């Protein structure tokens, strides 16, 4: 019992013992950052074409999940993802369909603009 208590106390107090070693290492708020590349979220709308297999259709949400091949125009690898689609577009699709489609992509949102069965 004493061994367990000693172990628990030593583990609990270890961070406090090392905290004192960090004195003098304050972060300088005036650090020059003008030359640092700050990545921004891409908010430009891009258009691309792809081919893929329809995996799931959600009429209520107006989306279709497609396992698409690589999209070189956007530097995307093959992946499965959801796309917004109109009710008319969704009516043309069935799960398992092979399609070719054009879409727009902005940030994390992609919408089908045209599609055709293969």
Image (cartoon, grey):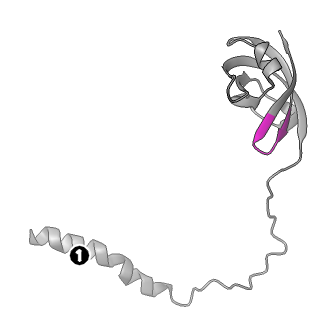
Most frequent secondary structure within the magenta stretch: strand
Residue sitting at the far bottom: 24
Give the residue pinned by disc 1: 9
Residue sitting at the far left: 1
Residue depicted at x 80% and y 15%: 99
Residue depicted at x 77% and y 14%: 91
Q: Secondary structure at mark 1?
A: helix
Using the image as rendered, state which of residue 47 and residue 31 is in the foreground: 47
Residue sitting at the far top: 118
Q: Quadrant of the C terminus?
A: top right
**Image height of 63 relative to 30, above or below:** above
Residue depicted at x 89% and y 47%: 44
- Left or right of 78: which side holds 49? right
Q: Is residue 106 magenta?
A: yes
**Percent of width and height locating residue 105:** 83, 38
Residue depicted at x 79% and y 59%: 39
Q: In the image, which residues are magenta?
A: 104-110
């Amino acid at each position: 019992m004493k061994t367990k208590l000693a172990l628990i106390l030593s583990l609990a107090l270890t961070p406090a013992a090392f905290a004192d070693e960090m004195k003098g290492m304050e972060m300088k708020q005036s650090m020059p950052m003008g030359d640092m590349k700050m990545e921004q979220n891409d908010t430009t709308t891009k258009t691309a074409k792809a081919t893929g297999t329809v995996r799931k259709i959600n009429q209520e949400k107006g989306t279709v999940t497609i396992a698409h091949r690589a999209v070189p125009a956007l530097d995307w690898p093959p992946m499965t993802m959801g796309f917004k689609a109109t009710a008319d577009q969704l009516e043309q699709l069935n799960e398992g369909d092979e399609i070719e489609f054009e879409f727009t992509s902005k940030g994390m949102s992609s919408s089908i603009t045209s599609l055709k069965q293969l």
